[in-house]
Structures are given as C-alpha cells and as structure tokens.
Amino acid sequence: MGAPGLIAAFTAGAATLAGGRALVHWGIRKGLAAPRVPHHTDPGAFGLGFETLRIGSENGRSLHAWFIPAAARGGGARAAASALVAADEAVAPAVVVMHGWGGNAALMLPLARPLHEAGYATLFVDARCHGASDDDSFASLPRFAEDAEHAFAWLAAQPAVDAARIALLGHSVGAGAVLFAASRTPQVAAVVSVAAFSHPAAMMRRWLAARHIPEKPVGRYILDYVQKTIGHRFDDIAPLATIARIRRPVLLVHGEDDEIVPIDEAQQIFAARGDTPVELMTVSGDHESFADLEHHMGQLVAFLNRAL
C-alpha cells in the first residue's frame, strides 16, 4: 500500500474510532441524564402567597423559581417600638431551597409552610435541566451549585431580605451542591444538607453496580469522562472535602432508613468537618421522604434561628 493509501486508511480508522468514542460519550450522557419531572403543585396549594420568577444563571440560561415572602411580623407592643426596631423588622432572614437529581422545586414545598410561619422568606428553585428551568448541555453537582449561588445573589438583592441572614438548604445532589456553594461563597450564613452523599465517586460506583457495569475498565472510563465533562475532580467537590472549607454553621440531616445514600455517609461528612460548626440530625425515613422531615421541622427551624 502506497503513502496515499496508508493516509486514507489511517484517516478512516481514526474517523471510526472517533465516531465510536462519540457514541460511547453520548451513551454515558444519556444514561446519566436526569429525568425532567413537571411540577404537580405550587405554593398556592399550601395556602401561601408567592411570586413566580425567572433568575439568570450560567451559560445564559434562566431558572424557574418561586419566591415566598416571610410572614408578616410585629403588631401590638412591637408596632409601637422605635424606628430602629421597625427598620430591623422590615427585613427577614431567608432560605434558598434546592431539590435533588431528577426532582424539582414542587417536591420541596412541604418545607415551605413551616419556614414561612417561622418568619423566613424562601426561594424554591429548579436547577437547570429540571422542572421548568432552561435546559443546558448537562446537569451536574457543580452546576446545581452555580444555580444555588445565582439564587442566593437574587435573594440578597431583595429589599425585604436581610442579605447577611441567608441560608442554603438542599436535598441529595442539591445538598452536595449547597455545601460546595457555601464553601466558596462566604456570604452564605448557614447550610442545611439533607441526605447528602459523602463522595460523588461512591455514588457513581453504586450507580454502576446497580447496572452490573464492571468498574474495570468501563467504570473507571465513565468516572474519568464525567470528571472531564463537569470540569471538576470528584475529590474537590465531594462533601467530605467541602464541609471543612465552610466557616458557617451546617446542619446535616439524614434518614435512618436511607438505602440510596446510607446514613454512614452522613457520619463520614460529620467526621470530616474540621473546624466547621456542624450538627448531625438523624430522622426516621428514607432518601425521598419529606413527611418524616416535616415532623422534625422544629429542630431544623431552631438550628436556623441559632445560626441566623
């Protein structure tokens, strides 16, 4: 075979290899993509007044969100207090609420009324590729964190919200995301992490095992590809690492019967806290059960009151 023939054969082989790799990468993204679940309710169904918003995020995308103002406070003797106290009462502490992978803001709404009645403004957000927010090339824990940071910035700019008293609350991947966001956003006043996994690689290995995908070599290839795609090493964004970089109070909440993320992982995060002030609260229930968390909202609100 002459030189032109060798070049043609090499080009064809490279094209075939590139095409095969592209197909594999498409399959990985397709397999890991979160389902988009439509909202089944809104805050009005819980008897709460709210505003529907679009909040800008990265890559020119926008997020769907519901803003629920804090319950009116004051009255009686407080109404006759000094102008200084009145000014302080005019702004409220607030909480950004982030759902988990494949979820949406509506699934987090059981938390809305207890937070509202406790005097907190709340912002329930759909991450990109979820709920009614814009699509993007992919979703990931760091992108959830970016969305939480944009939601935080929107809340901090509202005249009825005290920018110095804003907490982040997230569930599952959203929990890992708010921990990551708080580790690089010192203005966050407190964090509530519900059912966070300790390390993305551990979660990915469980995903691989459930699909009978061997870790060597296929699983390792997938893990490496995901890290390159999201632009972050798992070791850097893992709650095991981010927890010690937070300088504000953190509450770790985890279900005793969680089979998706074993409660051992919450204990691992707690043990890795370093100098971060962290509390660990275990509740009955599984990974997705907010009915159980509702019974413990008094403890959650007490933590926020102490922190904020």
Image (cartoon, helix red, strand yellow):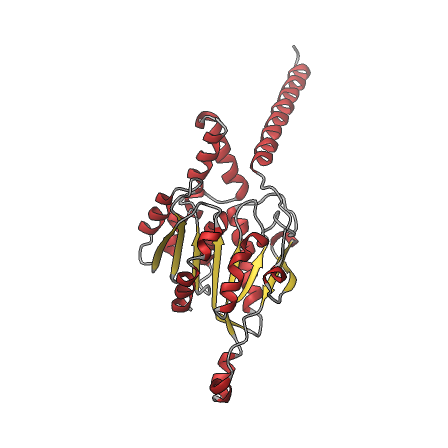
Rendered position, 214 above or below 155: above
Rendered position, 202 above or below 213: below
- 280 left or right, relative to 37: left
Residue situated in front as seen by the camera: 207 or 258:
258
Rendered position, 75 above or below 246: below
Residue situated in front as seen by the camera: 118 or 151:
118
Which quarter of the figure has residue 258? Answer: top left
Residue situated in front as seen by the camera: 177 or 125:
125
| Relative image position of residue 134 (x, y in whole percent) | 66, 51
Q: Count all numbered tags in the image, as a single digit.
A: 0
What residue is at 51 percent from the left and 83 percent from the top? 75
Residue 151 visible in the picture:
yes
| Relative image position of residue 187 (x, y in whole percent) | 46, 65
- 185 left or right, relative to 39: left
Residue 246 visible in the picture:
no
Which residue is most to the top? 1
- 159 left or right, relative to 266: right
Quarter of the image where the C terminus is located: bottom left
Quarter of the image where the N terminus is located: top right
What residue is at 65 percent from the left and 15 percent from the top? 3
| Relative image position of residue 261 (x, y in whole percent) | 42, 42
